[in-house]
């Protein structure tokens, strides 16, 4: 059923602001975890004594494509060092994880599933011909262990069974042996059935469970897209119903779901774990490639351009575990946290302000997003997310020159070597569509036939309109194109340098508390919004020089604090009666505002 497939990092390269964003990531925490963080630097995966389960595979899942997209030889060599060490420890049976033989039945094989995905990513980036055989033996051993009953899925492996299908699909295209489908069937039979869990998502509880764990849920949206062909099942579009339910009862303005750490309802003062942002993006990338449904690409844009940069510092050296729509402070809670199952410091910016999973896993978000800019079909190249990129294939060279999403002009420069069709997805919000200066009818996509030996340029432009979007509790959010806009709250940052459990925090990877120094208790006052698009800074989602601002008429109200908390605004305003005169306030993209008000009333 697959509509399209992904290009490799050899064919597809980021340009413009997207390349700068990846370089910031390489210069920050992602590019240095193997130097500073014990769970990666001293991992059991490379024969040392630190964590030997998900941390290194999580990190490699983003570090590998980052290295190859940037063509950075130092990063590539460091990635290979880890891959070489992992391969060197593979057992004759095929077992590859760092645990003793007698520990295998109690070892949560989520690590097998995750590493198999990483090996697939590494092969697609590097072309290392050792990998197909290594991967074959890993998954054949997994089949043997599961089919004989020596092990069973439990814990995270049971919840995330479908992640194995990234590697299974890769293997099937190379050898298509019967055991591959047998393993697929076993995984589904022993894995979690998320359709049965949907009633649990409607009324969040103050308890931790796999069935409502936000990262599991963001991962699982792609399970049918990944697995249905191997299982011989008809595609039913289960993901749309699952996502609709999650959105209806736990949705946020920026396309993600609340989950701190399990589902948390519709309150703008509940949090969302960063791992879920990265995993939701990856699910949307697969869902659009497999189904061709543009709704998944629209959601991908909203998450990537809002939720992802919002929860990571400008220099990408620190991140939050939990982000909030209305986040007026990031200070340690002196008592019970507002979060349902997370800690008093989960919303601080730092090295490991919650569990270390996010420290390792957020690395995949931008690199895999960059690899989703263009997709390929039979005689077709698809511009899926129109971010600045260059593509070099046997059919053609295609370069997209743009500052999208900050501006709405796209220039495709095409040099054809074979006949092919270029399909450009048009974002769902787009208005006033023009092609080469000529107005055209609004469409989900535009197609252009390109002939062998032809060189041509295609210019596409469109516009967006600022509009208030209804949110629960009679609140509103301001949308403009793929962006959601927020009231940015000025703050002072308190640096926290310390050591805990053998993990050192020191500048630039220390922790920070953010304390507001300005007012935040505002409401929208009119429906007039003035947009100013600026030059894109060296830091694309800069909190100091945001690339787009919207001036809005607003008034202060007596909003108040949530009962029992000194640094959390009330879920809903205590009063909507205006205080004082109208003020013109410059709102900024959600992703540029570290302290912010995003869901506010219209008075």
Image: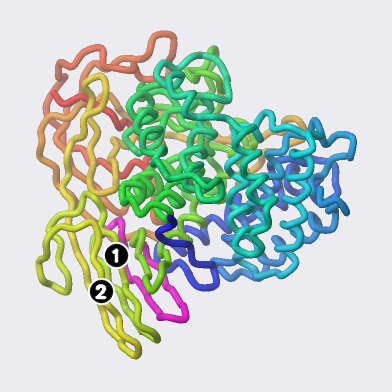
User: How far across and down, in percent of the image, does residue 304 sit?
Assistant: 40, 48
What's the distance in space between the residues labelled 1 and 2, CA to CA? 8 Å
Q: Position of residue 282 (x, y in %)?
A: 49, 48
> Residue under circle 2?
448
User: Residue 113 or 361: which is nearer the viewer?
Assistant: 113
Horizontal relation, residue 139 to residue 575: left or right: right
Mark 2, other Cα within 10 Å: few <14 / some 14–19 / many ≥20: few
132 lies above or below 187: below
Residue interval drawn in magenta: 387-407
Which disc is residue 225 wearing? none
Q: Which mark is residue 424?
A: 1
The answer to whether 185 appears left or right of 455 in the picture is right
Rendered location of residue 361, percent (x, y): 59, 44
Work out whether residue 262 or residue 314 is closer to the camera in this orientation and state it: 262
Quadrant of the frame with the C terminus? top left
Give the image quarter of residue 471.
top left
Report if residue 558 is visible in the image: yes
Image vertical order of residue 208 relative to residue 194, above or below:
above
Colour mapping used in the image = rainbow
Q: Is residue 15 above or below residue 587?
A: below
Q: Position of residue 212 (x, y in %)?
A: 51, 24
Magenta span contains residue 406? yes
As drawn, 409 above or below 107: below
Q: Residue at x 37, y 13 (%)?
A: 562
Number of callouts? 2
Of pointers 1 and 2, the one earlier in the residue sequence: 1
Whether residue 544 appears in this view of the structure is no
* Residue 69 image-quadrant placement: bottom right
Q: Do the numbered discs 1 and 2 sit on residues whose CB atoms are within 8 Å?
A: yes
Q: Nearer the viewer, residue 276 or 581?
A: 276
Q: Residue at x 62, y 36 (%)?
A: 352
């Amino acid at each position: 059923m697959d509509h399209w497939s992904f290009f490799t990092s050899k064919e597809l390269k980021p340009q413009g602001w997207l390349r700068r964003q990846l370089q910031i990531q390489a210069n920050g925490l992602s590019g240095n975890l193997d130097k500073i963080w014990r769970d990666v630097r001293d991992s059991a995966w490379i024969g040392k004594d630190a964590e030997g389960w998900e941390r290194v595979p999580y990190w490699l899942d983003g570090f590998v494509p980052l290295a190859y997209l940037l063509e950075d030889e130092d990063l590539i060599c460091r990635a290979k060092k880890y891959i070489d060490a992992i391969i060197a420890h593979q057992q004759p049976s095929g077992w590859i994880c760092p645990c003793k033989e007698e520990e295998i039945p109690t070892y949560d094989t989520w690590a097998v599933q995750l590493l198999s995905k990483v090996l697939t990513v590494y092969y697609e980036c590097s072309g290392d011909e050792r990998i197909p055989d290594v991967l074959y033996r890993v998954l054949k051993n997994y089949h043997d262990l599961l089919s004989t009953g020596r092990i069973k899925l439990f814990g995270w492996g049971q919840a995330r069974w479908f992640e194995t299908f990234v590697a299974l699909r890769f293997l099937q295209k190379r050898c298509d042996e019967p055991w591959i489908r047998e393993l697929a069937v076993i995984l589904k039979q022993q894995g979690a059935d998320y359709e049965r869990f949907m009633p649990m998502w409607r009324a969040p509880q103050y308890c931790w469970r796999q069935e409502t764990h936000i990262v599991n849920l963001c991962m699982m949206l792609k399970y049918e897209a990944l697995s249905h062909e191997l299982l011989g099942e008809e595609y039913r579009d289960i993901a749309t119903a699952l996502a609709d339910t999650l959105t209806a009862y736990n949705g946020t303005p920026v396309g993600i779901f609340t989950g701190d750490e399990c589902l948390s309802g519709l309150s703008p003062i509940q949090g969302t774990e960063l791992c879920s942002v990265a995993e939701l993006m990856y699910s949307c990338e697969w869902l659009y490639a497999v189904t061709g449904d543009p709704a998944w690409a629209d959601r991908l844009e909203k998450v990537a351009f809002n939720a992802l940069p919002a929860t990571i510092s400008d220099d990408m050296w620190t991140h939050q575990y939990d982000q909030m729509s209305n986040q007026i402070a990031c200070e340690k809670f002196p008592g019970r946290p507002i979060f349902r199952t997370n800690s008093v410091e989960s919303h601080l910016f730092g090295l490991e302000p919650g569990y270390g999973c996010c420290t390792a896993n957020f690395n995949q978000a931008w690199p895999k997003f960059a690899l989703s800019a263009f997709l390929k079909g039979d005689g077709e190249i698809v511009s899926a997310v129109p971010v600045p990129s260059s593509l070099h294939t046997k059919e053609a060279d295609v370069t997209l020159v743009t500052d999208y999403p900050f501006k709405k002009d796209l220039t495709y420069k095409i040099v054809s070597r074979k006949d092919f069709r270029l399909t450009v997805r048009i974002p769902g919000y787009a208005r006033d569509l023009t092609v080469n200066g000529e107005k055209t009818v609004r469409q989900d996509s535009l197609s252009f036939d390109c002939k062998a030996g032809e060189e041509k340029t295609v210019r596409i432009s469109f516009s967006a309109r600022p509009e208030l979007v209804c949110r629960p509790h009679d609140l509103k959010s301001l949308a403009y194109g793929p962006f959601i806009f927020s009231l940015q709250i000025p703050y002072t940052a308190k640096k926290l340098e310390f050591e805990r459990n053998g993990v050192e925090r020191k500048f630039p990877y220390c922790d920070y508390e953010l304390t507001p120094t300005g007012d935040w208790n505002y409401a929208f006052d009119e429906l007039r919004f003035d947009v100013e698009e600026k030059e894109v800074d060296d830091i694309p989602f800069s909190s100091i020089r945001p690339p787009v601002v919207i001036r809005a008429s607003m008034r202060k109200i007596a909003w108040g604090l949530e009962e029992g908390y000194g640094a959390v605004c009330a879920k809903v305003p205590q009063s909507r009666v205006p205080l004082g005169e109208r003020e013109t306030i410059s709102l900024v993209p959600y992703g540029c505002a570290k302290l912010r008000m995003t869901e506010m009333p219209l008075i």
